[in-house]
Image: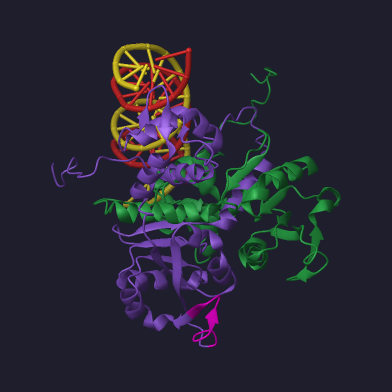
Chain colours: A green, B purple, C yellow, D red
Amino acid sequence: MTMTTEKETNQKKIPSMTVRRLFLYYRALLESKDTSVISSEELAEITGFSAAQIRKDLTYFGQFGTPGRGYNIDQLKQKLIQILGVDREWNVALVGAGNLGRALLTYQGFKQQGFKVSTVFDKDKEKVGKSYHGVLISDFAHAKEIIKSHDIRIAIIAVPAVAAQEVVDQLVEAGVSAILNFVPYRIKVPPHIKLLNIDMAAELGRLSYYLTNDVVLAKMPELKEDTL
Amino acid sequence: MTMTTEKETNQKKIPSMTVRRLFLYYRALLESKDTSVISSEELAEITGFSAAQIRKDLTYFGQFGTPGRGYNIDQLKQKLIQILGVDREWNVALVGAGNLGRALLTYQGFKQQGFKVSTVFDKDKEKVGKSYHGVLISDFAHAKEIIKSHDIRIAIIAVPAVAAQEVVDQLVEAGVSAILNFVPYRIKVPPHIKLLNIDMAAELGRLSYYLTNDVVLAKMPELKEDTL
DNA sequence: AATTGTGAATACTTTCACAGCT
DNA sequence: AGCTGTGAAAGTATTCACAATT
């Protein structure tokens, strides 16, 4: 049965919406220290997703529950840690030491989850050489060497929009394979690079839309991809 | 069997994924100053969405194009401004003057798009009364009066996770109807409140997943909801 | 008795492909 | 000839509902 040597059949296709929720399940479990077992219904209560959805999401990765009881919290947590790859510390490069960049640097939420901003880049000579929050600001001109020597695969970018594409091109060149983009500009990346956008102004734009067209939506039972 | 009328919708139903893209179309048009007309194909090139998708999205709101030519940029821009409700300035309250909150305050991307952070709240007496970036930090205890007097309908929250639910409850009580949540905690809101979450750590978690399970996805033709 | 795991049904989203307008 | 607008088809995602399991 496993004789077909086509590309990679080892990976059954995981729906991208499932991947989005995984980390949220994990975080919800961190909050649940009181009991040793949790049902999909209880996890649904905490996360706002439906119980059926949680069960289905989890079964993409195996069968972790016990019928009649629920999921063992420690065991499920371990499994999620493994699936998410957060059983290690990731070195992250931050590009752009402006207001937003510096705030992201001080944001504790990253380190708490195993993401360590180990380098900050900027091209402003005024900033280069100084330290911020204990992290040295390096010249982006040296990005390639530093990224390789620090084994950095994830970059967060918070540079001016006009510089974004060029910066990303160089990051990709330097070997970065995942980018979290805070710049309000649609960057293009080659297919093997994973890019996620956090577009704060666009989110406010959406809120403005909903207020303007007052979608008081009579019914809105649970959280949806929408609010995710 | 009929408890609630299902087709009572006064609005024709706009798909939520369409709403997400609207602001991005608008921003793309702001970049296109060179010509007076743009085709769905050109807009697709800029935004990374497919031309068919753009055309379909736009037709939910009317017929703005000219067959054989494309869309008149100024006209479409105007229309989008109107649809999105960004033809006005929105007063926004920011709750939480910590590192992230202060960075959001200085972020120029909001003001550029017509969102003015007119008030900052914190409950720390040390901070209250001081100004940051030209905005006075007010005591969250007075949120209700200030929100009403400033006609604030949108709030951005960047408080510690433990305080988030309580803060939101009070904001809702004060009359806020849209919330942009930066706190890594799943807040519950009543159905008439629009809540959007920006969960930075969760996004890094997703990237970690993709790196770990190296989804080098052989094919990834265009931007998808996924990266949006 | 409670709760999982999962096919089947439903709902939503994107893409296709082409008639029809300019 | 070129491009929009749009039904129909294809692809994803969510919910339902219940047999199986503890």
Q: Quadrant of the N terminus of chain A?
A: top right
Which of these two is toward me, A5 or D19?
Answer: A5
Give the magenta part as a residue range: B126-136
Residue at left 31%, top 61%?
A: B190
Q: Is residue B223 visible?
A: no
Please, is residue B115 above or below residue A86 in the view?
below
Quick one: B57 or C15, which is closer to the camera? Answer: B57
Instruction: Say if the magenta span includes residue B131.
Output: yes
Predominant secondary structure, magenta span: loop
Q: Position of residue B168 (x, y in %)?
A: 39, 69
User: How many dots with numbers?
Assistant: 0
Note whether residue B101 is visible: yes
Instruction: Give the quadrant of residue B218.
Output: top right
* Residue B21 inside the magenta-drawn segment: no
Which residue is painted at 77% across and 50% down in the image?
A152
Quadrant in the picture for residue A13:
top right
Depth order, front residue of B198/A123: A123
Would residue A195 appear left or right of B97 to someone viewing this image?
right
**Residue at the (49%, 87%) spot, across then down:** B129
Q: Is residue A43 above or below residue B143?
A: above
Q: Position of residue A83 (x, y in %)?
A: 62, 45
Question: Residue A88 in the image: x percent, y percent?
Answer: 72, 54
- Considering every residue shown, the one lying at the far left of the view is B2
What residue sits 39% from the left and 52% below the top?
A: A223
Q: Position of residue A207 (x, y in %)?
A: 39, 55
